[in-house]
Image (cartoon, grey):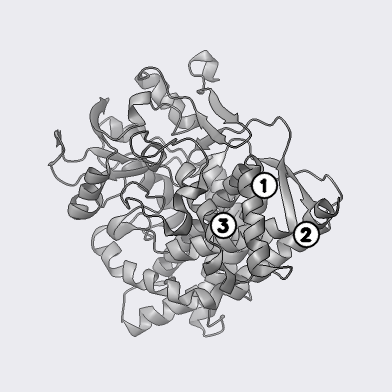
């Protein structure tokens, strides 16, 4: 790869009769040079960490003209994300530049007064108390996937990440834009987001050369077309809602109503940016979580058996419903352990507004503070057997340090859709597992990589088998 200048790290994966060490890149023996950091970032953002980073620590180093502070202790994560939130709230220029073309000043990458004004609006429309309003949408989407799988010829192989993206995009598209959104429009949005992620460059060289805002993203024709396709659908939906013709129960309608009630200043462009942000966050993160959960369960038959026993005990032979989710403790534990091993957003970079001090490190203004759930969740001094898949860590309401487990971030900028995403994941996983066994292609090597989110490199090819025939054999 890259003319021999860079080789991805080897992938470690190991299984036994009662354990499974989930796929992860082997830590580097020593820090790579700048060229390997640059080339490695274009392949994946999680493949160049050294062994010392997989422990609780605070470290500082330089990349060209930029100070980088690595923060990987619960105490100092709390300092950055809560105590000194105002100084560290700003997302890194790499992330802002990578997403601004698609999301504008949407909540995920905004900060300051813009973020303060919009956070309450968005948080209200996706608050956990609204989950029952979207339960029917989730249940119908899961049912549609089950029907599609039942119609497949035996041993038909398909790529699971794309399939889960289809499922979660259907849910979030209907929830955000309304039940009247046509299939063609929904597919246009899904394809636009997928094409954009493929084309985005997640390493902004200009920032490390001294440009505090980084360099603008190179806007290729493919990326411009992807953004135009997404914005076309969203703008049309918003205009429909503004005319009073949209689905009154949709998130867009709720956002417009709350905006009008509070006399907020969201114009059509701002409304589109927030709708696009909610769609991106709700679609991509849940899809990757479900993909990794199926991968883990397929390699841990003891965990899969316990999951099926729980579903049978609570649901019997009827379909899983939203009211069952609160009782599916082991299923939720599987999702939480999946989020620990494979956090959808494995890096949470922040840009320092003014000079500060973290632990023993004097922090420069404009520096990059790197908090990495990927490393924090696998720190050997914070988690027992950190690379093992062990859902029991979270079973029966087990307590854990909230600053050692941060798949949805933490503090004021914690993901507003946390409860929506978790309950959606539990419902979809239980619904599909109840009716089908998902089997990855024999001998297929999984490599987790991160560009914007954490995905299996090249996808995850699988086949599905109905459970009834398995139980009857």
Query: Which one is nearer the viewer's eye here, 340 or 8?
Result: 340
Is label 1 or label 3 in front? 3
Q: Which residue is drawn at 45% across and 45% down?
A: 340
Q: How far apart are marks 2 and 1 (CA)?
A: 13 Å
Q: Distance between the residues labelled 2 and 3?
A: 23 Å
| Number of other residues with Cα within 10 Å of mark 2, as a class: few under 14, some 14 to 19, many 20 or more | few
The residue labelled by disc 1 is: 160
The image shows residue 275, relative to residue 255, as above or below, that is above
Where is residue 150? Give x, y as percent.
81, 58
Q: Which mark is residue 331?
A: 3
Where is residue 322? Give x, y as percent.
58, 71
Q: Which mark is residue 148?
A: 2
Relative horizontal placement of residue 163, taking residue 384 as reference (left or right): right
Secondary structure, mark 1, is helix
Q: Earlier in the sequence, mark 1 or mark 3?
A: 1
Q: Which residue is drawn at 40% across and 51% down?
A: 100
| Number of other residues with Cα within 10 Å of mark 1, as a class: few under 14, some 14 to 19, many 20 or more | many
């Amino acid at each position: 790869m890259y003319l021999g200048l860079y080789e991805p790290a080897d992938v470690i994966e190991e299984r036994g009769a009662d354990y499974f060490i989930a796929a992860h890149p082997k830590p580097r023996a020593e820090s790579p040079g700048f060229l390997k950091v640059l080339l490695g970032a274009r392949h994946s953002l999680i493949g160049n960490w050294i062994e010392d980073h997989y422990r609780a620590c605070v470290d500082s180093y330089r990349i060209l003209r930029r100070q980088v502070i690595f923060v990987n202790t619960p105490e100092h994560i709390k300092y950055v994300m809560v105590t000194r939130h105002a100084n560290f709230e700003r997302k890194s220029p790499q992330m802002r530049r990578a997403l601004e073309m698609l999301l504008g000043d949407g909540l995920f990458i905004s900060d300051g007064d813009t973020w303060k004004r919009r956070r309450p609006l968005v948080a209200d429309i996706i608050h956990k108390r609204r989950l029952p309003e979207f339960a029917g949408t989730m249940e119908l989407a899961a049912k549609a996937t089950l029907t599609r799988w039942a119609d497949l010829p035996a041993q038909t192989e398909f790529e699971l990440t794309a399939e889960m993206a289809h499922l979660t995009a259907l849910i979030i598209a209907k929830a955000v834009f309304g039940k009247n959104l046509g299939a063609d429009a929904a597919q246009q949005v899904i394809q636009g987001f997928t094409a954009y992620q493929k084309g985005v460059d997640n390493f902004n060289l200009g920032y490390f050369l001294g440009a505090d805002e980084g360099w603008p993203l190179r806007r290729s024709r493919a990326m411009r077309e992807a953004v135009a396709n997404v914005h076309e659908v969203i703008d049309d939906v918003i205009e429909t809602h503004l005319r009073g013709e949209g689905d009154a129960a949709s998130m867009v309608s709720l956002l417009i109503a709350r905006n009008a009630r509070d006399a907020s200043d969201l114009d059509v462009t701002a409304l589109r940016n927030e709708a696009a942000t909610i769609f991106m966050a709700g679609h991509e993160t849940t899809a990757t979580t479900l993909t990794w959960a199926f991968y883990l369960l397929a390699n841990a038959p003891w965990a899969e058996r316990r999951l099926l026993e729980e579903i049978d005990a609570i649901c019997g032979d009827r379909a899983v419903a939203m009211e069952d989710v609160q009782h599916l403790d082991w299923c939720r534990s599987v999702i939480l352990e999946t989020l620990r091993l494979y956090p959808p957003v494995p890096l949470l970079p922040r840009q320092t507004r003014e000079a500060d001090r973290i632990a023993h490190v004097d922090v420069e203004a404009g520096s990059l503070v790197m908090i990495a759930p990927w490393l924090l969740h696998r720190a050997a001094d914070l988690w027992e057997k950190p690379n093992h898949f062990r859902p029991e860590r979270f079973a029966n309401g087990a307590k854990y340090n909230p600053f050692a487990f941060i798949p949805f971030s933490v503090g004021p900028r914690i993901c507003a859709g946390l409860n929506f995403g978790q309950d959606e994941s539990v419902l979809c996983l239980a619904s599909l597992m109840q009716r089908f066994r998902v089997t990855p292609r024999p001998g297929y090597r999984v490599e987790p990589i991160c560009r914007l989110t954490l995905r299996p490199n090249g996808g995850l090819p699988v086949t599905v088998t109905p459970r009834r025939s398995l139980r009857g054999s």
